[in-house]
């Protein structure tokens, strides 16, 4: 008894020491996360300030190519991760594993027919779709345009005790569709615009109409809305139907175009395989189906993982049990990508700021060249009218001074006036034709090649991709404003865009660069200083 009491007495300080160490470690992690959160918030505020003070006013003035609807809407208040996949692919189980509590219902049958936003908070509370969409500050008011059927199938779950600084968006499980995909549909996995958004001529929204009325709302459009605003997208596949559902392939080809920089493909529930050749067949089937919609020689990476369950211990002795460590490591990689959502948010905002600045600058420069060319021709034509009128009257005045009859001098004056009127009429016809010519793609292309000849000679594909997005906006702006009312661009406005591209964005990139952990960044900083 005495010996047991001594052991207990000695164990108490040891346990207390361990608790203090654990508490200190958790406090250190919390403190580090708070510092990171402040850093990300500060960077987001800086990008928002530049966009609001420089880009949006100039875009409004020139009817520029930046999507005003997107920028009028607020982004969701927290970074968020968007989860897509077939029904019973393990999305909800992954959410519960990630949050370390049962937030979503799980099961083999479909358990959810709507979108669920899960956010951290001080207390557990649920909010229905109308309240969520009606809140002007949360950033989901843009969903209102998709109708009441979607709003009624949307909810917010706030849960306490979640150690996360991001939100999760769970989506309805995708199912087989009776509609077949067009043979020409392909997933443009070659790379997005830097903003991750489609330009006007690329937007697939019109092709969605009427395609998903069986859900009560346009599911592909809603997926596109979430995907554009998400910071990380996880697309889950399961061994039962690895990428073979029509709706999944439809979403890849239509809703996730240009999203490859934040899209991660996950083959889940790999622990269900009992034989290695079953895994090989499922993996090969997934790759085969993806190859039909991703027109690249190299397929994107596919994470193979499983969610830990009570049966994992028993399954470890069978099937792929020998590879369970690899599956666990792969799962932690996916978790790591999810936890990088705040960092991704900042990176996406900076990238979008750069892309928007370059896009608006090209629009502004070609716009000014167009205005200057029209104004020059108009001034030349006006000078011709003035010269005809003044010259005719000067001849009449000199004839009168030299003793010609007043009737003849008056006739000369009238003739000059008529000639001037004829020149005015001819000029109006010529200027109307000039407006039509200048709006033509060939004329605008000539202005573009003159302005960006050096970049084109160097084979700059990014400049060409910008031009394809700028061209329609230029034609719309010139036609809407009218050539006679095109606003003159100030040199300070172009200088402000140049400052964002050359100074502000590099400074933002350096602030979020991993200088403390990356030797390459440390060396670059030494040379820069």
Image: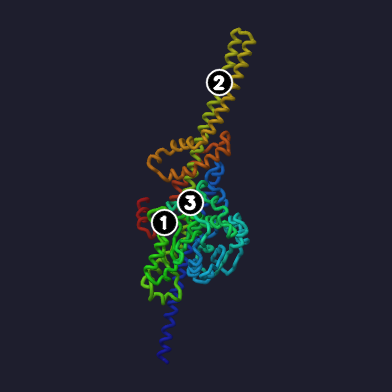
The answer to whether 14 appears left or right of 473 in the picture is left
**Does the image show residue 113?**
yes
Residue 226 position in % (x across, y down): 53, 57
Q: What x and y, as percent, mark residue 482?
A: 58, 36
Judged from the image, the secondary structure of the residue bearing numbered disc 1 is helix
**Between 234 and 219, the one nearer to me in the picture:** 219
Residue at the extreme bottom of the image, as rendered: 1
Residue 129 left/right relative to 342: right
Q: Position of residue 13 (x, y in %)?
A: 43, 81
Does residue 134 show up? Answer: no
Q: Is residue 178 above or below residue 322?
A: above
Q: Which residue is mark 3?
A: 195
Which is nearer the eye, 201 or 379? 201
Image quarter of the N terminus: bottom left
For mark 1, what is the residue?
A: 291
Residue located 41% across and 89% down the image? 4
User: Is tag 1's residue or tag 3's residue first in the polypeptide sequence?
Assistant: 3
Indicate which disc residue 270 carries.
none
Number of residues whose C-alpha sits closer than 10 Å to that of mark 1, classed few (under 14), some (14–19) or many (20 or more): some
Answer with mark 2 or mark 1, whichever residue precedes in sequence. Answer: 1
Residue under label 2, please give it: 387
Query: Which residue is depicted at the point 41% across and 63% down?
Result: 303
- Foreground pick, 457 / 390: 457
| Residue 78: image location, x then y, percent | 53, 60
Q: Residue furthest top?
A: 403
Frontmost of labels 1 and 3 is 1
Is there a contact, CB below 8 Å, between mark 2 and mark 1? no
Report, in whole angstroms, how far the alpha carbon at label 1 lies from the one at label 3. Answer: 25 Å
Number of numbered discs visible in the structure rendering: 3
Looking at the image, residue 366 lies above or below residue 110: above
């Amino acid at each position: 008894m005495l010996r047991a009491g001594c052991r207990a007495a000695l164990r108490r300080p040891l346990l207390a020491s361990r608790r203090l160490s654990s508490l200190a470690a958790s406090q250190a992690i919390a403190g580090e996360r708070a510092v990171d959160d402040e850093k990300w918030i500060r960077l987001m505020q800086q990008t928002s300030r530049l966009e609001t003070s420089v880009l949006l006013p100039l875009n409004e003035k020139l009817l520029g190519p930046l999507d005003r609807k997107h920028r009028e809407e607020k982004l969701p208040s927290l970074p968020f991760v968007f989860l897509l996949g077939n029904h019973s692919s393990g999305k909800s189980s992954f959410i519960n594993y990630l949050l370390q509590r049962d937030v979503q219902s799980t099961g083999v049958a479909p358990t959810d027919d709507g979108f669920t936003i899960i956010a951290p908070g001080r207390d557990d509370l649920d909010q229905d779709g109308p309240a969520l969409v009606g809140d002007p500050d949360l950033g989901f008011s843009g969903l209102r345009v998709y109708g009441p059927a979607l709003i009624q199938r949307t909810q917010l779950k706030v849960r306490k005790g979640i150690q996360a600084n991001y939100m999760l968006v769970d989506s309805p499980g995708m199912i087989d569709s009776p509609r077949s995909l067009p043979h020409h549909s392909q997933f443009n996995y070659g790379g997005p615009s830097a903003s991750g958004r489609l330009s006007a001529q690329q937007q697939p929204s019109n092709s969605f109409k009427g395609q998903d009325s069986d859900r009560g709302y346009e599911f592909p459009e809603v997926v596109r809305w979430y995907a554009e605003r998400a910071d990380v997208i996880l697309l889950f596949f399961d061994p039962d139907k690895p990428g073979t559902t029509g709706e999944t392939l439809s979403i890849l080809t239509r809703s996730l175009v240009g999203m490859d920089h934040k899209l991660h493909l996950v083959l889940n529930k790999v622990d269900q395989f009992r034989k290695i050749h079953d895994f090989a067949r499922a993996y090969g089937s997934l790759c085969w189906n993806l190859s039909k919609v991703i027109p690249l020689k190299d397929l994107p990476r596919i994470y193979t993982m499983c969610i830990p369950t009570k049966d994992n211990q028993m399954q470890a002795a069978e099937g792929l049990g020998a590879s369970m460590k690899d599956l666990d490591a792969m799962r932690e990689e996916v978790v790591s990508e999810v936890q990088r959502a705040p960092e991704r948010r900042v990176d996406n905002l900076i990238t979008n700021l750069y892309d928007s600045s370059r896009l608006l600058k090209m629009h502004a420069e070609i716009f000014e060249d167009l205005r200057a060319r029209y104004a020059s021709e108009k001034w030349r034509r006006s000078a011709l009218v003035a010269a005809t009128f003044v010259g005719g009257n000067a001849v009449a005045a000199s004839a009168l001074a030299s003793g010609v009859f007043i009737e003849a001098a008056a006739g000369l004056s009238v003739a000059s006036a008529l000639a001037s009127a004829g020149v005015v009429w001819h000029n109006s016809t010529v200027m109307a034709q000039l407006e039509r010519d200048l709006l033509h793609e060939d004329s605008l292309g000539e202005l573009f090649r003159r302005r960006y000849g050096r970049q084109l000679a160097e084979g700059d594909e990014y400049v060409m991709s910008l031009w394809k997005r700028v061209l329609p906006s230029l034609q719309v702006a010139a036609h809407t404003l009218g050539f006679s009312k095109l606003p003159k661009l100030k040199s300070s406005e172009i200088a402000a865009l140049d400052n964002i591209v050359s100074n502000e964005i590099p400074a933002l990139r350096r602030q979020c660069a991993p200088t403390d952990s990356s030797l390459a960044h440390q060396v670059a900083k030494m040379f820069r200083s």
